[in-house]
Structures are given as structure tokens and as C-alpha cells.
Amino acid sequence: MRSLLVLAALWAVGCNGNITVTFATGPQELDVSATQLSLPDALRDGSGNIASVSCGPMGMCPANDTITLTCESGVCDPAPKTLSAPVGDVVDVQMLLSDTSELGVRSIDSYEVVEVAYDISLNTLTVPIGEVDVFWGPEAATAVDPSLGVKHFGTIDAIPAGQTGMGTVQIDPDGAAALSDYLVNSSPRVRFFAQTTVDLNPGDPIPDGSLQVTVNATVRAVGRVL
């Protein structure tokens, strides 16, 4: 099933032959797991919280491969952890807009992101996460890295532990404009990524659970009939 659904096509008034097509990308999924935030047993207090463990000689703290532990005021404190994940799969706008050929569209001049809605369908995380930044990048991009052509696209508000619900992404106008230019002039295939930061402290619940979010963008394409 195609992930992009054409919703409507409206002919613009005038004699320049332009046509506007509004479509939705369909749900693109984002998954976050607490396994990315695992802590050493030494920082578990037995009651489900992060233990307050005194630093060792010269500020040493238990070794951990997942989260860096730093000595803060004499106590081992997990450093803020940045989490990144892909959002859905490659989006091929040209292929998914192929149905518009029946409407006479032969060339797209620009894309406008009208709205990006999100739905937190599952949230069993025991810890909150900070603002979630959404990025777009070329098909070949593998991570949130400007050197790979990845650019900021928008932001989702911080998500409290266990909270579900729906909302809209705060779109970055510059990122959306850059996306339009890329789709028109470089390639119709792009990827999306999400990135957030989790800051754990002694006394907080031990990280557990998972988060599932679907993101669906409404886009307006302006094209020409040739």
C-alpha cells in the first residue's frame, strides 16, 4: 500500500496552467526504547529508582557502555543522553505522486508543508523525554549529521513519562523551504529522523518501557500542466 494518499486536487484560477494538489504522507513510525538508557546495577536502589551512589577516588563512577556517568557534588550522575532514530522509511514523493498524472500534472514547482500531525499511541516509558527535534535528509543519510545534508525540520514538545495523545509538530520554516527546494531540484527521495535528549538524575525512576509515535504530514504541491 502506498504511504502517500492524494486527498484533493484544485485547479488554480488563471491562465498559467498551474494545479495544486494536497496530499498526506501517511503514518511514518518512530520507536524509542528504554534499552538505550540502561544503567549499571550499582545505580539501582532496589525500589525501582536510580540510586544515589557516592563517587569513588578521583571522582570515579561505575563503568557503563550506554550512558556516561559523571561525578556531580560527590554523587554519580548519569549525563544527558541524546537519542536518535529514523522516522518511517524513505519517502519517494515522485513515485507517490504518480497518480496525479491522471489530473494532468507533469511538473512540480514547489512543496508547502501545511501541517505535521503526530499521535503518541503507546508510552510506557518511566522517564520523560525532552523536546523531540525532527530532521529531514537525503536518501543516503544514515544519521542526524549536517555533513550528510541533514537539516532541521520541526519540533515536538517534551513528552512526560507515560503521556499519550495527539498534537502538531512546530515546523521550522527554513527547514521546510530547504526541503521543498531539495525535492524540486535534487531528488524526490528523502528520509526523516528524530532526536531528543533524556536527562536522568539520582532518585528518578529506572528507565523502562517504550514509546511509539506516528507522524503524518499534509503537503501542498504546486505543479504545471505541460
Image: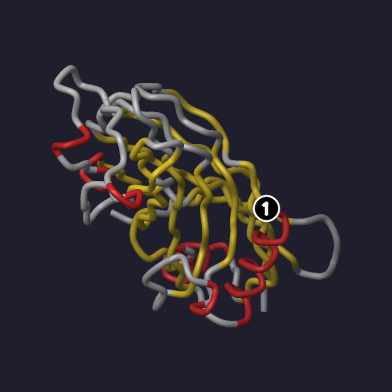
Q: Nearer the viewer, residue 17 or 48?
A: 48
Query: In the image, is residue 54 above or below residue 197?
Result: above
Query: In the image, is residue 147 above or below residue 111?
Result: below
Q: Nearer the viewer, residue 98 or 72?
A: 72
- Percent across and percent down for residue 9 are 61, 52
Name the outermost residue toward the right.
14
Name the outermost residue toward the top.
47
Left or right, 164 with respect to 34, comes to: right
> Would you identify the image quadrant in which residue 38 lies?
top left
> Would you identify the image quadrant in which residue 226 lies?
bottom right
Q: Nearer the viewer, residue 160 or 71?
A: 71
Name the outermost residue toward the front.
57
Look at the numbered disc 1 and give the secondary structure of its residue: loop
Residue corresponding to mark 1: 172
Q: Would residue 146 be seen by someone viewing this image from the given angle?
A: yes
Residue at coordinates 85% horizontally, 67% vertically from top-left?
A: 15
Quadrant of the frame with the N terminus: bottom left
Crowding at mark 1 (Cα within 10 Å: few <14, some 14-19, many 20+) = some
Query: In the image, is residue 157 above or below residue 1?
Result: above
Residue at coordinates 69% horizontally, 72% vertically from top-left?
A: 109
Residue at coordinates 42% horizontally, 41% vertically from top-left?
A: 198
- Percent across and percent down for residue 201 are 39, 32
- Percent across and percent down for residue 173 are 72, 55
Left or right, 77 with respect to 166, comes to: left
Residue at coordinates 46% horizontally, 30% vertically from top-left?
A: 159
- Percent across and percent down for residue 27 are 39, 45
Q: Nearer the viewer, residue 153 or 5?
A: 153
Q: Amino acid at mark 1?
A: Asp
Q: Would residue 29 be seen by someone viewing this image from the given angle?
A: no
Scheme of colours in the image: secondary structure
